Image (cartoon, rainbow, N blue to C red):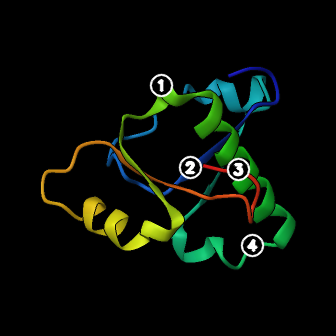
Amino acid sequence: MGQGGRLISYGDLSGQTINIPALAFSVCGISITGVSVANWGGLPDHVRAGDIATSLKLVRTDTDLFDVAAEYDLAEVTQAVRHAERPGKAGTVLLIFGAKFGTMT
């Protein structure tokens, strides 16, 4: 992480300790903040909009960040939820939004 970097922790899905050298904070000006699903909805609209934009960018451009189990159209949300809740499911289930919202994943 570079000078003035910012680490944002989104919950604790891994259960792993975050290991960052203590000097990184003072010498490099790195900051760390956290957010969870429980408090994300209460953040200002512009912050949530930025989070969504960043998430969509990652989904579109950095697909190697996660394995995709399946993609479903928004009209198939029930099937997508069933798939996401399957025991032993591996990978991410994506909902694909159509023309009403622009083409978004």
Disc 3: which residue: 103
In this rendered view, identify the residue nearer to me: 46 or 77. 77
Q: Which mark is residue 43?
A: 4
Q: Is residue 92 left or right of residue 89?
A: right
Q: Earlier in the sequence, mark 1 or mark 2?
A: 2
Q: Which of the labelled discs sits on residue 9, or is there none?
A: 2
Quadrant in the picture for the N terminus:
top right
Numbered disc in front, either 4 or 1? 1
Could you say whether the residue bearing mark 2 is in a helix, strand or loop?
A: strand
Q: CA distance from mark 1 to mark 3?
A: 20 Å
Which mark, by number, is residue 64? 1
> Identity of the amino acid at label 4?
Leu
Which callout, 3 or 2, points to the residue nearer the camera? 3
Would you call the spot at circle 1 few (<14 residues within 10 Å), some (14-19), or many (20 or more)?
A: few
Between the C-alphas of marks 2 and 4, the distance is 15 Å
Q: Position of residue 18 (x, y in %)?
A: 45, 38
Which of pointers 2 and 4 lies earlier in the amino acid sequence? 2
